[in-house]
Image (tube, helix red, strand yellow):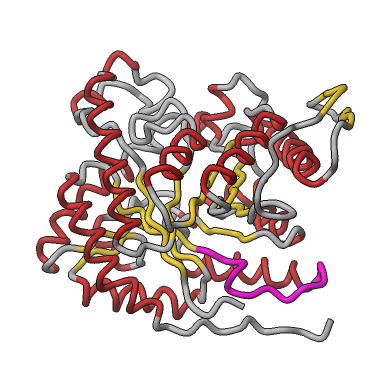
């Protein structure tokens, strides 16, 4: 069982040059927001800043770096999580590299298995491979039927597992993927395969899928009461599957920034709202098209956002712990409360997001590594209750 929480740093890598007046002209911040607003030279400078943040996180003792994948998103310039992870593998030396994750329904599973194996070899076995269904927008951008998303995800997952654990060559004839010869040459260092993480925000089906396979479930910032409910779903499902889960099977993501004073951190943290207010903006059919998720998941997703009619303010988000800002002393107190409530093996902090300036992120990383993370490591995690199996 894990004794203490591992803390991961995550950058959304936003294209922060987009202005409010640009976005407000369009119904959606994604599917119909023109890419003519993108300047590759400005992106070049931003990418290098985000890579500097990764280097500093490694140097300051952060346990891991998480990266992800989004498409048609000005607030996240990472259409390839694997490319970002490859950069991380070469500019860092100690951190775990968590991809959370690769969007399987829109990917070639065999190529995905090969690329992830390369990353594990590049990094010397530091890869944590997270798989995701992807947001509804990703499915729509790929031109796929949203009702097929989960089935495509599960079959792609199964084929990747076979690539990593079954000697080739072999044949695969599935519903969506057909390969007469599967024989990847590059295989992961970690055996039988890298650790698998699976995230979710409100879907109980996703929690049960992860628990039935013994994978780590990472909740993506749902409110505390819903997160505790989903954690219990994981525990109950794991017991039915025949194993006792522990902190190593559960993670939680939230936004956090540290500054030298509470007042400075409160000012900086407002930059998070640039993402919070725009990433889900648009017609309902863009974010939750019919058939993409179950009715139960859709209802829980409304709870995750704080209700169907009221948008949470900056202060509300701090009150419920979705955004944590403050001096090291304040952030330690707030995150310690989260750790004590959830008992997670992994805490993923979105620390570079929205319109937060690069210099403020760098100072936040310094304070995280030197003061906050050592204090969180002192909190001893507890075993989850074990029934008679």
Q: Nearer the viewer, residue 193 or 378?
A: 193
Q: Is residue 276 above or below residue 23?
A: below
Q: Residue furthest top?
A: 36
Q: Residue at x 31, y 49 (%)?
A: 55
Q: Is residue 8 above or below residue 45?
A: below
Is residue 151 within the magenta segment?
A: no
Q: Nearer the viewer, residue 253 or 169?
A: 169
Q: Which residues are magenta?
A: 239-251
Q: Residue at x 50, y 29 (%)?
A: 286
Q: Is residue 224 above or below residue 195?
A: below
Asked if residue 205 lies left or right of residue 5, the reply is right
Where does the image place residue 206, in percent across and percent down from the top left? 66, 52
Is residue 250 within the magenta segment?
A: yes
Q: Residue at x 55, y 33 (%)?
A: 136
Where does the image place residue 285, in percent across and percent down from the top left? 53, 30
Q: Is residue 387 above or below residue 37?
A: below
Q: Assign the N terminus to one quadrant of the image.
A: bottom right
> Is residue 40 at all visible to an observer of this figure?
yes
Where does the image place residue 190, in percent across and percent down from the top left? 66, 54
Q: Assign the C terminus to one quadrant of the image.
A: bottom right
Where does the image place residue 261, in percent across and percent down from the top left? 11, 68
Asked if residue 155 lies left or right of residue 219, the reply is right
Q: Quadrant of residue 161?
A: top right
Asked if residue 240 lies left or right of residue 291, the reply is right
């Amino acid at each position: 069982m894990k004794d203490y929480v591992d803390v991961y740093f995550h950058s959304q890598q936003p294209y922060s040059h987009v202005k409010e007046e640009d976005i407000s002209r369009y119904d959606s911040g994604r599917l119909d927001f023109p890419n003519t607003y993108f300047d590759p030279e400005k992106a070049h400078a931003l990418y290098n800043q985000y890579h500097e943040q990764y280097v500093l996180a490694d140097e300051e003792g952060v346990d891991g770096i998480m990266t992800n994948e989004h498409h048609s998103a000005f607030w996240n310039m990472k259409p390839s999580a694997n490319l970002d992870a490859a950069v991380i593998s070469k500019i860092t030396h100690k951190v775990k590299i968590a991809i959370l994750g690769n969007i399987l329904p829109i990917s070639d599973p065999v190529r995905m298995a090969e690329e992830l194996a390369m990353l594990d070899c590049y990094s010397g076995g530091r890869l944590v491979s997270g798989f995701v269904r992807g947001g509804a927008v990703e499915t729509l951008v790929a031109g796929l039927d949203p009702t097929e998303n989960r089935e495509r995800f599960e079959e792609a997952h199964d084929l990747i597992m076979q690539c990593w654990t079954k000697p080739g060559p072999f044949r695969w004839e599935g519903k969506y993927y057909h390969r007469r010869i599967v024989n990847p040459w590059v295989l992961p260092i970690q055996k039988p395969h890298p650790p698998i993480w699976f995230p979710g925000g409100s879907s109980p089906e996703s929690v049960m899928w992860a628990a039935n396979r013994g994978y780590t479930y990472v909740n993506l910032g749902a409110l505390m009461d819903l997160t505790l409910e989903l954690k219990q779903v994981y525990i109950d499902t794991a017991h039915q599957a025949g194993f006792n889960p522990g902190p190593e099977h559960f993670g939680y993501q939230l936004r956090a920034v540290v500054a030298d004073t509470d007042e400075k951190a409160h000012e900086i943290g407002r930059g998070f709202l640039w993402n919070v207010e725009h990433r889900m903006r648009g017609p309902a059919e863009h974010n939750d098209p019919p058939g993409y998720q179950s009715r139960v998941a859709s209802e829980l997703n409304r709870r995750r956002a704080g209700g169907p009619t009221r948008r949470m303010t900056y202060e509300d988000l701090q009150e419920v712990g979705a955004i944590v800002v403050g001096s090291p002393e304040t952030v330690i107190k707030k995150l310690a409360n989260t750790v004590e409530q959830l008992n997670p093996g992994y805490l993923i902090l979105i620390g570079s997001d929205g319109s937060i300036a690069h210099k403020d992120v760098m100072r936040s990383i310094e304070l995280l590594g030197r003061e906050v993370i050592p204090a969180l490591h002192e909190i001893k995690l507890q075993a989850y209750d074990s029934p008679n199996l």
